[in-house]
Amino acid sequence: MKISFIGAGSMAEAIIAGLIEKNICRGQDIFVTNREDREKLGQLERRYGIQSTYDMEGLIKNADMVIFAVKPKDADSALQKIQPYIQSDTFFISVMAGISIAFMEEKLKVPCAVARAMPNTSASVGKSATAVAFNQYASVNQRELAATVFSSIGITAVVEENKLDAITALSGSGPAYIYYVVEAMEQSAREIGLDSNMAKQLILQTLAGAAEMLGTSDCPASELRKAVTSPGGTTEAGIKILQKNNVEDAFIQCIKAAAEQSKRLGQIHDSKHLV
């Protein structure tokens, strides 16, 4: 199986690492290119035993999957560069935020299988939550291949494309929201006199334990919260402050704003580049 990457940034590397670690694809069958950073390509070659090239025709020819992992601002020029080599049997899958399938179809100019995937940065530790949307040309085998590839870096769900802005806001940006909460917990630990290193370990274990409980329990989050919130107890005192400061509503508005921004950025990009 041959998988080619256009773009060699952190997301491409995370997927490459997952493919090799899970024995889904051999390093010698993974090809990667970028715009001009030969040093980064050399690092990936040495680290994973993959192949790098600036031969666009060779990169795409006979590839089972072409993963497009450039920055959204570079999408138009990169698509134009590879367009002459796209064939009807090419399976093209983008991990760029906000770039529509319609835009890619327009630029590729050849009716072929096109998909959008939305991983998150936890892909680098094999814990991404990835959503994938396909166009009408994607075969059953190609859909299964995408699920296999993205399952190498976490869990995968197939969705309609119109859900991707919401998913970008929820799980694509989601790690940042959790990091924000951890920042606040670390600051509070300092203010109540706890050692920073010890506090960090306690916070991490608390998060891991809560995630495990949510994943294994049949109870919803609200019931799990109530189970540890004794009347008059310490947890209740803390929860009351969160409620007083409308933290739940702030998180809801946070995710809604991120979803609207994802939609807006996609519309702006498409309006500028679709001709």
Image (spheres, rainbow, N blue to C red):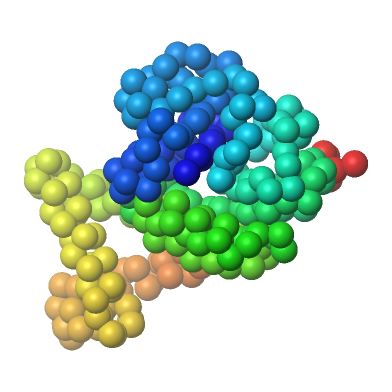
Residue at the spot 74% in from the left edge and 48% down from the top edge? 88
Residue nearer the viewer, 80 or 250? 80
The image quadrant where one finds the C terminus is top right
**Figure disc tally:** 0
Vertical arrangement, residue 246 with respect to residue 129, above or below: below
Q: Is residue 8 above or below residue 229?
A: above
Q: Is residue 11 left or right of residue 49?
A: right
148 w.r.t. 68: above or below: below
Q: Residue 4 appears at what percent x and percent y?
A: 54, 36
Where is residue 129? Give x, y as percent: 42, 58
Say which of 73 and 18 sits in front: 18
The quarter holding residue 273 reads top right
Can you see residue 129?
Answer: no
Q: Which residue is pictured at 13% across the width and 54% down the height?
A: 202
Q: Is residue 190 visible?
A: yes
Please say if 81 is above or below 261: above
Q: Relative to residue 215, is residue 139 drawn left or right?
A: right
Look at 40% across and 56% down and name the residue there: 151
Residue 71, image x, y percentages: 60, 34
Residue 233 quadrant:
bottom left
Q: Position of residue 142 (x, y in %)?
A: 57, 57
Image position of 127 (left or right of 252): left
Residue furthest right as drawn: 275
